[in-house]
Image (cartoon, coloured by chain):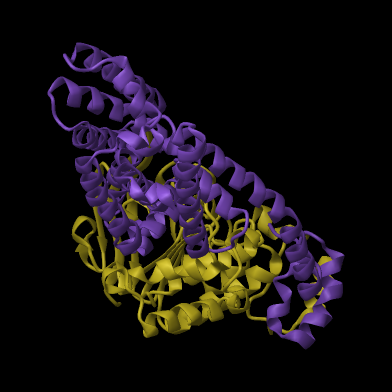
Amino acid sequence: MELLNYAFMQRALLAAVLVGVTAPAIGIYLVQRRQALMGDGIGHVAMTGVGLGFLLSWSPVWMATAVSVLGAVLMELIRWYGRTRGDIALAMLFYGGMAGGVMFINLAPTGSTANLTSYLFGSLSTVSETDVTAICLLAAFVVLVTIGLRRQLFAVSQDEEFARVTGLPVRALNLLTAVTAAVTVTVAMRVVGLLLVSALMVVPVAAAQQLTRSFAATFAIAVAIGVAVTISGTITSYYQDVPPGATIVLLTIAAFLLLTALAAPLARRRARAVEQGAGDPAECAIPETGPETGKQTVPAGRGSPDGGGA
Amino acid sequence: MSEPVISLRGVRAELGSRTVLRGIDLTVRSGEVVALLGANGSGKSTAVRGIIGQVPVSAGEIEIFGTPRARFRDWKRVGYVPQRTTAAGGVPATVTEVVASGRLSRARFGLLRGADHEAIRQALDLVGMADRAKDSVDALSGGQHQRVLIARSLASEPELLIMDEPMAGVDLASQEVLAATLREQVAKGTTVLLVLHELGPLEPLIDRAVVLRDGCVLHDGPPPKAVGQHALPGHDHVHPHAASGAEPVRTGLLS
């Protein structure tokens, strides 16, 4: 592995692994809440942060973190209050963020649209020492939140109304999810770029779902896929001289297609097993009375395939 | 009489510009089973969602266990079963994982100990879903899904159960299990507030019915006699007090 002899490749691989862990880890909660595109929106808003970073000669990574956290909180508040016109407000936030980024970076003395491109599509080989430090700190935060609070985040993302009655601080957890997603976007910004961040949040989760029945397994497999594609994408880009961000995203989609193809026969076999195990699957509520009474119930169940109901 | 567990006085609520509740008074006392009845749009679900704080109320007072709702923190005493449509995530989750979130109100920092896992298992046992514990909730029928949601509300061993249309879209077998589960809870002294479209198989359990119409209380007293659809001969009528092994009865109804 001679590529590990280069300091820039060591940094690139470290950053890539951290993105592979964090993006699916928060992405799974976004997918669970059916806000799969939230990462994309935050990515747009983060562009203003990058532009401001150049304009003020601050670290674009930290500036993007600040602005995207602000944007994510704003999105969550819009979701909370503006139920009726929420989507329009979100659209304005997204495109305003993108336009702001382009504007600021052109006003900046050192900036040009070329600089912006490295943030839009990622630029692994230019990841600096300070970038790596920032990425490590931010990734640690994301991992702590997504694993430490997994039961709370699961409950809130699964059923917000019920979570409120278990006494969970629903609004605080919603805001925390939004902030964590924003932080993840800036972690992933240097690796896959702002425009492709959302793919790493959503596609590994979607791929993992093809095989799993539980949330815990989906989480583990999604993170494993994330790490596998970011590492292999980074290595591929080193040897083949292709852009790492695009390589990683295409590999993720390939993983999704592969697992989907594998899942179809698996699901069929599972369905057959259920059918054989429990008789008529539409009426599988019956066997819980015990195996011998269960058999007696089958004729009644067959008489009414939908099980009656209201 | 025992102390009120839920108390609503002059509660008003608006959804958007539409007034849904126009000054509701409702008291549920300890150990009572109260059904909240009414047509679609009468405000019965909004009333329940106001009690749990999902819908803001614009006027009036709500107290739970004698504490104003805004200051009520003792949520482990309350079990809630929402309408099934609200509880669907975009990621697979097993029956156990869903029921475990009902135990969070008793778990410190979201850490589940041995006793918590035991309570989760017991809740699944109560609704007869223990054998499906490792299955994905997406693979369940409507009635089974509803039983999982009820297990989730029972996981915290609540003193008060609030259920929003627990029988909607539930097959006969599950209706029987639900009625039996509820009967067991009521026998233990659990207070129950149910939103129902009609009394149906739960009728024998219900002490009192509150009927809403257009956001006002129309009737508060003994359950109304069977009328309309409920009295029709073809209407599903499962008697939860019949023996659970009464297969001939069910076969007769279905054929």
Q: Judge from the rendering whether residue A264 lies leftward or rightward of residue A38; answer left or right.
A: right
Percent across and percent down for residue A300 are 83, 72
Task: Tell me which residue sits at (76%, 73%) in the image.
Answer: A278
Q: Is residue A191 left or right of residue A73?
A: right
For the point 25% across and 53% down, which residue is it?
A: A141
Above or below, A196 against B170 in this view is: above
- Image quarter where the C terminus of chain A lies is bottom right
Is residue A36 visible to us here?
no
Residue A136 % position (x, y) = 25, 50
A107 and B179: which is toward the camera: A107
A256 and A178: which one is in front?
A256
Colour that chain B carries in the picture: yellow
- Give me the chain that's purple: A
Q: Quadrant of residue B19?
A: top left
How many numbered marks does the figure carry?
A: 0
Query: Nearest the camera: A139 or B114?
Result: A139
Residue A199 image position (x, y, % from top left): 48, 38
Examine the image and state in which quarter residue A305 appears.
bottom right
Please give left or right for residue B3 compared with residue A120 in the image. left
Q: Is residue A90 visible?
A: yes
Q: Relative to A121, does residue A186 appear above or below in the rendering?
A: below
- Expressed as whole percent of the image width and height from the top left, the position of residue A83 reads 38, 33
- The structure residue drawn at horizontal position 55% and vertical position 48%, both measured from the top left corner, is A206
